[in-house]
Image (tube, rainbow, N blue to C red):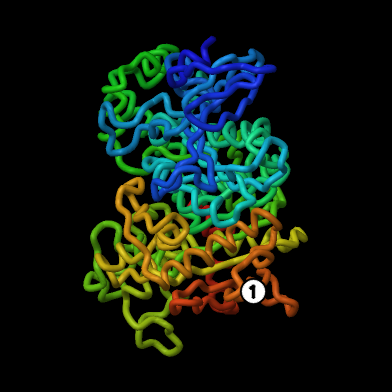
Amino acid sequence: MLLLLCLPAAIAASTTARQLTSNLGPVVDLGYAAYAGNTTSPSGLPDGPVAFYGNIRFAQPPLGELRFRAPAPLDEATRTLQVLDARNWGPPCIQRPAVVGIGSEDCLTLNVWKPTNASAGAGLPVAVYIHGGGFFTNSPQGFPMYDWVAQHRGLVGVSLTYRLNLLGFLGGPVVAADGDLNTGLLDQRAALEWVQRHISEFGGDPAEVTIYGESAGAASVVMHVAAFGGSKPAPFKRAVAQSIGFGPTNTDAQTDAFFESAAGFIGCPASGKDAMPCLRNASIGAIVSAINRNPNGAFAPVIEGLGGFLPDLPSRLIAQGKISNVEFIGGHCTGDGNTLVSFAGDTPADFQTDDDVRRIVFSRWTGVSNATIDKALTMYPEPGAVGSPFATQYERAGAMTGDMIFTCMDWFLAEKLTMNKVENVFAFSWNAPDAVIYEQAPYQGAAHTSDLYYLFEGTNTFGNAGNTFTPFNTSETVLSKEAIAYWTSFATTGDPSREKMSVSPAWDSFSAPDASRRRLMFNRGGNTSTNSTMQAITEEEIRRCQFWMSEDVTAETRV
């Protein structure tokens, strides 16, 4: 059977009345496959409150003829009599920078955490996490969900892999004619559909699924909300988008140029009927070379047109109401823009004049017109100008970058869902720095990914797949528990306040009774409580977001 040939070595099992067991750990039987999990807690103590099942395949290996195609379904019709070892992670998908032997093209797996005592059919809510990393790096290993499930005790957690960079997002008409576009997003969708079919066997409720993501993971969340222009039912009920980060989406001309570049480096024709067979037969070494010789962002989600998974820019689909009306939390880190405007190594000292702001901020937005840049500079008045809220040009540039890439998209989607009468819509701003990043670059403040530091065990998740761990101090522990309680309460009830910590403030809805807009600001506090508090979104912020999300401007920023 193809499935078993491609999974980890099968483990001897006993059967009693068709009950599969294993001496390795608790078994979950899906019918077509069965998995032995791991109940060891992070501290090494046996029989922890959470059982982990990793390296669970949700699609066929995307190899050979399946390279550059939508994920192919598994054979789920044949009953297995074997138990497979699911006590560890599956391989990450091939990253960028790419190295032969690190990561795998055969990587379409997911991971499940469940309460040890949860049985099949328990009907627990499900939290599914989609990792970020610019669509070219990272893996689920940097985002362990043990703490979410252990703290809540009534939740099932899932994380998933998806093809990255060239293997996940090679675009252009040649691919569309003999393959599929946005296969990385289709991988995510296939994993969510697997959850719908099988999560009940882990104790989860397929009708109570919430998807989460940060940065490119949050962009993925938005794209799932807007998938197929809202014409197909979403395989989830709720969505949480943290620091929505994408754009500018490549134009057709750019996509074609990157396809030609990749084909040239691999040694394949860039057109004709032989192009895709050549690319499918190419060695992984040639693929790795092409990944490394094209820039970050060369291979990312593309617009497919009518009938595709991504029929138009997400901003246009949201504006037109062509989305799934799901319950929603959206927010960002206060230093997101500081991080991205410093990404090329620029520091506050590099921002002294209007020309510095214009040159550095818009270097990645080559499609933005001079008229739009001029308008943006007036909307973010220079330091010292009457009414300017910015103390330095760097602060001004960071605010502009943050709004353009992150902040305004979460406001825009929350606004549209509120207009569409979705009741459970919430917003946040994260103002507690990641201690590791802050020590390296304090001028970034609560830098991009700071929220992840608190949500995932103090893991420095920015760019290293969670290989660095920093123990929390007491106040960080309090904020971590507060955030996890809000995030898991939303998955359980649609209301982040329903199961919050007693010391935490109520997280009020995005739309206030007076029709103003508000969000929860996350702040560190003392050793027993945080300083998190509700705040109004100012009219000035809303005016700027209306500018960035206007049809004319999004046509240039391509978000």
Above or below, 194 relative to 115: above
Residue 14 x, y percent position in the rendering: 57, 17
Snapshot quadrant of residue 99:
top left
Q: Which is more toward the observer, 366 or 341?
A: 341
Amino acid tagged 1 = Ala
Q: Residue at x 64, y 13 (%)?
A: 78
Quarter occupied by the N terminus: top right
Which residue does the image show at 47% across and 13% down from the upper left? 5
User: Relative to 108, does residue 44 appear above or below in the rendering?
Assistant: below
> Left or right of 545: which side holds 323?
right
Say if residue 118 shows up in the picture: yes
> Where residue 162 sits: x, y (%)?
47, 35
Query: According to the image, label 1 marks what residue?
Result: 506
Q: Residues within 10 Å of mark 1 (few under 14, many from 20)?
A: some
Q: Nearer the viewer, residue 18 or 79?
A: 18
Q: Is residue 455 left or right of residue 304?
A: left
Residue at the outermost right position: 421
Q: Residue at x 40, y 12 (%)?
A: 274
Horizontal and vertical percent for residue 368? 43, 57
In the image, 234 versus 503, the foreground residue is 503
Image spot of residue 328 (x, y percent): 65, 57
Residue closest to the eye, 242 or 272 = 242
Q: Tell me, yes or no, if residue 133 can be seen here.
A: no
Which residue occupies the extreme top position in the image? 1
Q: Is residue 528 left or right of residue 424?
A: left
Label 1's element?
Answer: loop
Task: Report the side of 34 relative to 293 (left or right).
Answer: right
